[in-house]
Image: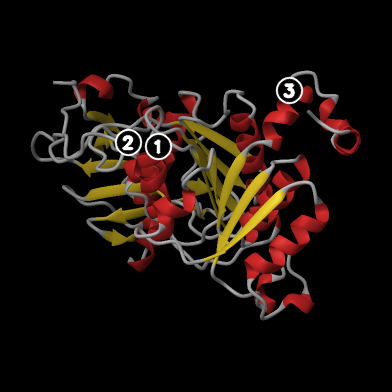
Amino acid sequence: MRAAIAPGFSELFITVNPSGEVTRDGLLNLNMPWLFAPWPEARTKGVIEAEVEGETLRALLTFLAEAYKKAGVDFEPINPRTNDMDEDYDVLINGNNYITLPNRLDTKLEDGDKVKLKILWRWDG
Amino acid sequence: MLDNDELVRYNRQLRIPDFGEAAQEKLKTSRVVIAGVGGLGCASATYLAAAGVGHITIVDFDAVELSNLNRQVLYWEEDIGAKKVMVAQKKLSRLNPTIEITPVCAEITEQNASGIISGAQVVVDGLDKSDARLAINRACVGQKIPYVYGGVSRLRGMMTTIIPGATPCLACFSPEGPRGLGVLGITPGLIANLQALETIKLLIGQKPSLAGKLLLFNGNDLKFRVYDIEKNEGCQVCSQGSVRRRADGA
């Protein structure tokens, strides 16, 4: 699949097999520079495109983890111990949390799907 | 000047080359507000009191419950039902009678946050709600008081040191996250001790380590991740607000 990736504040916005140009319209300024580590050109381009092997959400997240690892960033949205989403992150497809989908991380992504991967903040004390 | 008892009490930290008597004297005259005295606040208050921070204001409105005792180590069974700030004030004063502990029994809101933190050199986060944190964040930015954010759940923790004008503030991120996931007491203990360390660095004039950085602690596999963070120029609290910028900077 082709993935158009737009790093946000503390999230990644990804459009799967986009039919047209993906822009940063509506996204505010940037404040987690490490999110750009694998694609420094995104700093100026705003959005980059990448080819991902596989068709599922899991394949996309695995691709992202590998891309960050190569860039020297320890970013592991899928926890290797549980083989599920790590507690520090959450992922939504077209606004729906992955846990509400029957196949969860193994959900097949469709053309135009919008995936949002975000860091969860901690509020308990 | 430190008296003889203080020279003995703080002897082990006075031996640290870049700490010493000058730093200890700064701590002695320092003013810190600890917002919330739960799992985080109990630990940070204990270590800041033990280290000799001269004036500590502790703020909380809750009473001690049995379910607090797995992590809120200033409270014991005999304290159940008592106001947390009163119990904490008594125990911290027994730990270090040379310092001043001021209890404030109040729930932090947008309306009272500014008054509560007024006069503090550093505000330490011990809260358990996002709205109270954002109220404290706004007040700290308004009064240019450093705010050491910490948050936990389960075996995970997060922390950053907010220096108004220099680093992102909490509102820069529109942060989202779940509450009430449960927590092992060690997690707030660990994060709170890091908050206390950052606080002491700020008070004695050393550079804080987590200004402009976000620390994620993962106790499941014992990993610490530290990410750089930048100000959001569209932040309604610490920047001009409602500014949108294209990625190319235009």
**Which chain does tag 1 point to?**
A
Residue B42 horizontal side relative to residue B16, left or right:
left
Give how far across and how far down residue B231 sits, in percent: 34, 31
Q: Quadrant of residue B246?
A: top left
- In front of the other: label 3 or label 2? 3
Residue A22 seen in the figure: yes
Say if B105 sits above or below B56 in the image.
Answer: below
Q: Secondary structure at mark 2?
A: loop
Q: What residue is shown at x 20% (from left), y 39% (from top)?
A: B241
Q: What residue is shown at x 75% (from left), y 41% (from top)?
A: B52
Say if B98 sits above or below B111 in the image.
Answer: above
Quadrant of the snapshot with the C terminus of chain B: top left
Checking the image for residue B22, the label placed there is 3
Residue B119 horizontal side relative to residue B244, left or right:
right
Q: Which residue is mark 2?
A: A52
Q: Nearer the viewer, residue B91 or B4?
A: B4
Say if B72 sits above or below B218 in the image.
Answer: below
Amino acid type of disc 1? Phe
Task: Kindly check if marks 3 and 2 are in contact, taking CB atoms under 8 A apart as contact.
Answer: no
Quadrant of the snapshot with the N terminus of chain B: top right
Task: Kindly check if marks 2 and 1 are in contact, taking CB atoms under 8 A apart as contact.
Answer: yes
**Which chain does tag 3 point to?**
B
Amino acid type of disc 2? Val
Amino acid type of disc 3? Ala
Give how far across and how far down residue B125 sits, in percent: 53, 50
Q: Which residue is mark 1?
A: A63
Q: What residue is shown at x 69% (from left), y 41% (from top)?
A: B53
- State the separation of the CA atoms marked 2 and 1: 6 Å
- State the separation of the CA atoms marked 3 and 2: 57 Å
